[in-house]
Amino acid sequence: MWPESPLLRDAGAAVLTAGAAMAVLRFWEEAGNRALLDQKLCRKLVHISVGLVFFLMWPLFSADDVYAPFLASLVIVLNIIKVTLIGLGVVKDDGVVNSMTRNGDHRELLRGPLYYACAITLTTIIFWRTSPISIAVICNLCAGDGVADIAGRRFGHKKLPYNPDKSYAGTIAMFTSGFLASMLYMCYFHLFGFVDQTWIMVAAFGTTSLAAAIVESLPVSTRLDDNLTSPIASSLVGGLVFYYIGDGGGATGGDRSSIVAMAEMVFAGSS
């Protein structure tokens, strides 16, 4: 039985969420330490699984507690601190380095992995679970970008004419996996009444995933980082698309009443 107090319930949900996310992360750290998988593949499996498992736990939180998104993101914030300390060389953790970097350099943690964690944290706090934008951002970032790298390395022999660092296979995989993951989470969140489940929503998710895949394929994503450009593209395009179809705030107004309220929160926080 969940406690009657929304705050106590959400504190318990935060503990369970942290436990699930850390268990997945620890599993891949051990795989990296034991060299059971190629380092690049292990890194992308972390990228795909940790965010999606974290996302899976959101229905555990109450709809009545304004602190719910902050408590939910607490585990990611703690991971940001951990990754930053390891990236700066203050703390040594070979498991984290081996499972989350391309070349075993701890300084890499201060780029892609840090952007990834910050993107999920901001998405959780700003959009939360009744906005389909959160689904688009996290699914395109975790499933889309993660599978794109794996597919690109294995099948990406034919490169894009405008970016030799990206391939047709990777870009197609980014769109397909991001879109399919978005569909699955739309159905999952619809079970709890968080978002609508309509063909218009399907089209909106497809448009957002396509935009994210296109942006990920551009040279600017290579110069910056996919973990930075993909969430930005998904949030901006998703914001426009879902606002246009009138579903920026999801099926219910319990957590966020509309996309306007979200924007007001962002601007109020930055002022």
Image (tube, grey):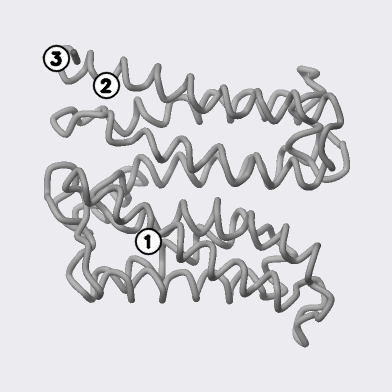
Badge 3: few (under 14), some or many (20 or more) residues near its Cα, within 10 Å? few
Residue drawn at point x = 76 percent, y = 29 percent? 31
Residue drawn at point x = 30 percent, y = 16 percent? 11
Q: Secondary structure at mark 2?
A: helix
**Disc 2 versus disc 3: distance between alpha carbons?**
9 Å
Residue type at tag 2: Asp
Q: Earlier in the sequence, mark 1 or mark 3?
A: 3
Residue type at tag 3: Ser
Residue 244 shown left or right of residue 49 in the figure: left
Q: Position of residue 151 (x, y in %)?
A: 72, 63
**Mark on residue 5?**
3
Report the front residue among 212 and 58: 58
Residue 46 shown left or right of residue 261 in the figure: right
Q: Secondary structure at mark 3?
A: loop
**Mark on residue 10?**
2
**Foreground mark, 2 or 1?**
1
Residue linked to disc 1: 183
User: Is the residue 18 above or below the residue 137 in the image?
Assistant: above
**Disc 1 versus disc 3: distance between alpha carbons?**
33 Å
Q: Quadrant of residue 240?
A: bottom left
